[in-house]
Amino acid sequence: MKRKVGLFLFAVIMAVSLGAAIVVSLAMYRLVSDKQAAEIRNLESSLTERFAIFQTMLRSQHAEIVAHMAKVLPEIVAELERLGRAPAGLSVAELDELTRRHGVQHIYFIDRSHKVFQTNLASDMNLQFPESSFTRFLDSVYDAGKVLNDGIDMSALTGTLRTYSYFGPKGKDYIVEISTDVRKSLADGPFGWMSKFFFEDMFSDAVRSNPYVKDVDIYLITPAGAWSLLHVGKKLDPELAGRVERSGREEIADPDGRHLTVYSGERTAGASDPSHPVSSKLVVRQITYDTGLARQAVIQVFLSAVLVLAVMLPVVFWIASRLLQRQLLDPLFKLRGEAGAIAQGNLEQDIADTGRRDEIGQLAASFAAMRDAVRGTILDLKHTNLSIERFVPKAFLAIVGKSSIVDVALGDNRRQDMTILFSDIRNFTTLSESMTPDENFTFINAFLERMGPVIRTHGGFIDKYIGDAIMALFPRADDALKAGLEMLAVLDAFNDERGAAGLAPIAIGIGLNTGSLMMGTIGEVHRMDGTVISDAVNLAARIESLTKQYGVEFLISQHTLDALADAGAYDIHPRDNVVVKGKTRPVTVFEVRRPREISKLPGSA
């Protein structure tokens, strides 16, 4: 009988262990696969956001090019009239000189039959345009006497972005067309550094920051084909581009299953705006991802489970056999269940068998005593933690990676990019001199009581109070900016209350800066404090002090402006390039003005 029970127990333990190993392995595979899918979605969203930045830059450059073309096209025709030269009689050298003199790249002359009869680009000479919406557009240009623009498109020959402008002189049977390489125009313009960053660094950063991302690319689908915006001359397979355009998404795995390439399409932001330079164009995002991590995780988990099983099985089998022989399984299982309930937080769980006079009874009585002691300790800890949270914010603990204040040790620190907010009451020293110490504390606490909830509502937390000043930290620059604007609105309500009580209104200054900072603990074993160490914090304080110098309420740095998701959604104006105290390099500061209604802020409730 003992042998049969032992064999049965061994078989059950083996089956359960192997089953658990398989379930855990599959769960790990699913978990890693879901995480990879989420990362790909996040990358797609990131590529869309980065492309939106490019569209903003493109719109601005396109407007400059169009304005320039509107000026020089009539001048070119007037120059030919003045010289008495017909376009067909011009040499390539003369055309090149004409384009150089007027600051353009390529020039075309198109007759009434929609044929290029003169150009300085040899590959396009005698190019005949077939009947299409484009030729109908050309018909509207002939003899119109004004410059028209057909937006931005991709060159069918080079795959580069170009903008085209057209001028039909009065009384002439031809059109003058000028094309400009947008990428070159961007590079030669005042924001060439931004263009270089977009094409060379902005997208490749996604590959450098994630070891499992192997390649990213952006394609623009036009009648000329699906060309890469990042790699000149690289073209997407037309059949693949068609599938993405129809379905919106296409996933292609390597034959070995190691890499997955995802193509996803999305219409440009200007799809509903006919004046947008790339209106109604389809953008295809390409992400090549290493999917071998999921398979590797399954193998490692399964092998680890088998190894643990091989080591622990004899011990578990021996213990279980001994307990069965002594008929202790039932009371121990019951006690284990009671202990598990306590471990899950049920501190009211009843403990059975406490009246027994053997070891099981003693063990049960010990569990009951432990339950009572743990219950008392947890209640004390809850009250203690509630008190501590008023001095050490939960957000601080989360950033340094601690779940509780008791886990914090001297020297714990963590680096993170955050936005720092400083606010300060104007002329507080003069104001405080007219009040008693009790009145001072009452006034400061009344003011801070209104400002603290605003900061927390917008996802920030107060790092410290410096007298009447507040230093707060925000993970997102937009939240910090919205919090600052709402603080000004709350200040108005506070001043209304002071006015009703016959007290003078107060004013505050707010400064924001964004950058990397170190958050951690300093001090010594018996007395330590949480603090933030960063040059970005010092700069935020300096920027707040500049509000007094410029007589404004709210200033932000260039770093914060760059970190905003959509700076155009706020009323922001350049203020000055200044060298703040303690710095050697100039800092660009911007004034943030209040909107008419706080509720109009993007993302406000």
Image (tube, rainbow, N blue to C red):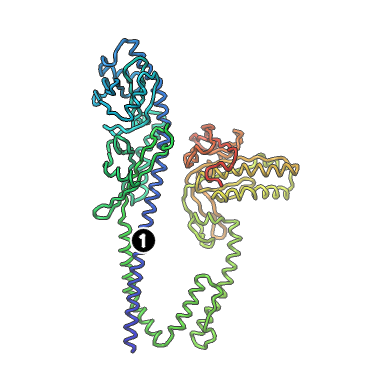
Report the front residue among 483 and 304.
Answer: 483
- Please, which residue is most extreme toward the bottom here? 1
Q: Quadrant of residue 5?
A: bottom left
The residue tagged 1 is 30
Report the front residue among 430 and 490.
Answer: 490
Q: Quadrant of residue 309?
A: bottom left
Q: Is residue 498 left or right of residue 469?
A: right
Task: Give the position of the N terminus as an image quadrant.
Answer: bottom left
Position of residue 328 measured from the top left corner of the image (x, y, whole percent) = 44, 85
Report the front residue among 38 and 557.
Answer: 38
Camera sees residue 428: yes
Position of residue 100 measured from the top left corner of the image (x, y, whole percent) = 33, 20
Three-letter amino acid code at the position of disc 1: Arg
Disc 1, SS: helix
Position of residue 351 measured from the top left corner of the image (x, y, whole percent) = 53, 80
Residue 587, relative to residue 395: is it above or below?
above
Disc tally is 1
Position of residue 572 measured from the top left corner of the image (x, y, whole percent) = 53, 35
Camera sees residue 207: no
Residue 304, relative to residue 237: is it above or below?
below
